[in-house]
Image (spheres, rainbow, N blue to C red):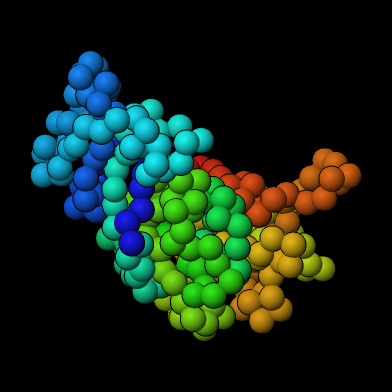
Amino acid sequence: MSRFVYGIGPVRELLRARPDAVKAVYLEARRAERGDDAVAELQQLASAGRVRVDARPRDALDRLVGQDARHQGVVAEVGPVAYVDPDDLVAVATARGEPALVVALDGVEDPRNLGAIIRSAYLLGAHGVIVPADRSAAGTPVVTQASAGATALLATAQVNNLPRALEELKELGLWHVAVHASPEAKPIAALDLAGPSCLVLGAEGHGMRALVAKQCDFHAIIPMAQTGVGPFNVSVAASIALYEVRRQRDASR
């Protein structure tokens, strides 16, 4: 099943980083005729990556991605998500000469939350995301849209047994940090996150399962100045936690 990445920025980044993942690029016919700088760059990148470019009416693009999508007259067709094994995520980090940073999600079912988490993980330097085969929104078009194309750029591992996958990552040297409130939780900035780490977050509303939390070496909370509207949304919490890892690692260089 094909997925669609849209917008000038996401499609440009996709053509630069993974042209092999792109089946075709569709340009709004009127924009293609104008041939502005952005379109010219996309056409050059597509040509370099041997990706087919088609001009189509705007309503045809709307039908591909939805009339409410801000596609800017640019849509890329990509294949289905190609899942990898969890240890492949660590191999990516090793190949880059970086301490591994993985995000494991225990049942995030809202596709917009999942897409936003994948986008933040990509932007903040994570090497991949782990999702369970069930209780997850992975692979849906809405996830691809919400990630702004990051699903095609960041490796994703899908597992049948998340606790077992976490145990395997621990054997590869990763420390697991549960981002949730618990009696033993410490402010996330108080933890040393410069080494190989896996951030673990629970589902919307239900939180993290006890069996998953038990696999974690540390528990972290994100301090809040106000509590009248409840805790952070899971995608916001993931972004803050990922930024703290990035901040610590940048400071340790």
Instruction: Please state the total of marks drawn on the protein image.
Output: 0
168 versus 242 height, above or below: below
Please tell me in which quadrant of the rendered image residue 199 appears. Answer: bottom right
Quarter of the figure with the C terminus = top left
Determine the residue positioned at 79% across, 45% down. Answer: 224
Please tell me in which quadrant of the rendered image residue 136 appears. Answer: bottom right
Q: Nearer the viewer, residue 62 or 204?
A: 62
160 versus 106 height, above or below: below
Residue 72 shows in this picture: yes
Residue 235, position as x, y percentages in the image: 61, 51
Whether residue 210 sits left or right of residue 12 in the image: it is right
Quarter of the figure with the N terminus = bottom left
Determine the residue positioned at 73% across, 49% down. Answer: 232
Q: Nearer the viewer, residue 244 or 87?
A: 87
Whether residue 32 sits left or right of residue 141 in the image: it is left
Q: Nearer the viewer, residue 6 or 173?
A: 6
Determine the residue positioned at 36% across, 47% down. Answer: 4
Residue 200 shows in this picture: no
Whether residue 69 sits left or right of residue 243 in the image: it is left
Residue 38, position as x, y percentages in the image: 27, 23
Residue 150, position as x, y percentages in the image: 40, 48
Whether residue 122 sits left or right of residue 229 in the image: it is left
Which residue is most to the right? 228
Determine the residue positioned at 49% across, 81% down. Answer: 160
Please tell me in which quadrant of the rendered image residue 8 appears. Answer: top left
Residue 242, position as x, y percentages in the image: 55, 50
